[in-house]
Amino acid sequence: MNPFPNDEARREFYAGAREAMPILAGTVPFGFVAGVAGVAAGLSAFETIALSVITFSGIAQMITCQLLATASPLPVIFAAVLVLSLRHLMYSASLSPHVAHLSPRWRSLIGYLMTDQGFAMGTRRFSEPGGPGERHWHFLGTGLTLYVTWQLAVTIGAVAGAQIPANWSLDFVVVLTFLSLLVPAVRTRADLGAAIVAGAVALIAAGLPYRLSLVAASLSGIAAGVAIEAWRKR
C-alpha cells in the first residue's frame, strides 16, 4: 500500500529523510547516553523507554533523570522540563503560518515530532520560494528519521545501562551534542547574551538543591535575550 498521496509527497519525504542523515552521528550517542542515564537514575529499562516515547526530547529526558536521581519533588521536575521546553512555543508560532492549511491530525503529528534540528530544517524548507505544496511531508521525513533513530539508541542504552562501567563517564557526549547545536544558533547579540547569562547563572547557582540551577539559568537566559532584543529595537 502506497502511503504517499502523490509523487511530490514521496519526493519531499525522502528528501527530508536524507537531509536528517548527517545529524544522526550526534543523535545516536546522545540517545544511547539518555538510555543509560535513565537506568542509572533508578528507572527500569521499560520506564526509560516509555519516558523517551512520551517526551521525545533529549534535554527533557536528561533533566528528568538527573532530578530523579537526586530525589527531587515532582513539581520541581515538571517546572524544569516546562521551562526548558518553552522554546517549542516559539517553534510552533514560527511554523504555524506554513501548516495552518493542514488538518488537526497533521499539525498534532508535526508538533509531536518537533525537535531543534527538525525545526531548523523545516523552517528552511518552508521558507523556500513557492507554495506550501507537500512540504509538510519533508518535515515528516526528517522527523520520523530522527524519531526512529533516537528511540532505537535510547532502547539500546537502556537495555545495556546496567553493563556500562561508571568510569566511562559518557556524560561528555551530551555536552558535545548540545554545543554542536548551540554554536550555529548563536547569530545575534540577543542569542549571545542569552547564552552567556545562562551559562554564568548555571555556574553561580550550581550548588542549589534539586538542580534548580538549571531552572534559574534557563529563566535568566530567556530574560537576558528578550531584554537585549528589546534594547536593540529601541
Image (spheres, rainbow, N blue to C red):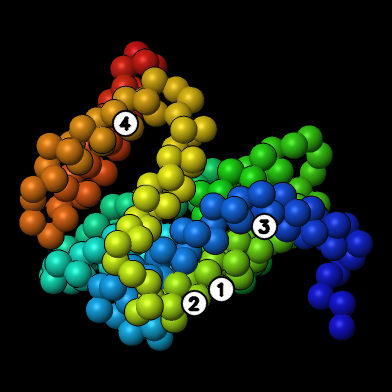
Q: Residue at x 51, y 49 (%)?
A: 116
Quadrant where the C terminus sits is: top left
Q: Secondary structure at mark 2?
A: helix
- State which tag comes first along the sequence, 1 or 4: 1
The residue labelled by disc 1 is 152
Amino acid at the residue labelled 3 = Thr
Label 4 vs label 2, nearer the camera: 2
Amino acid at the residue labelled 1 = Leu
- State which tag comes first along the sequence, 4 or 2: 2
Label 3 vs label 1, nearer the camera: 1
The Cα atoms of the two marked residues, 3 and 2, are separated by: 20 Å
Q: Residue 90 vs residue 229: left or right? A: right
Residue 170 image position (x, y, % from top left): 37, 58
Marker disc for residue 142 = 3
Residue 177 sits above or below residue 146 on the image: above
Residue 93 sits above or below residue 77 on the image: above
Amino acid at the residue labelled 2 = Thr
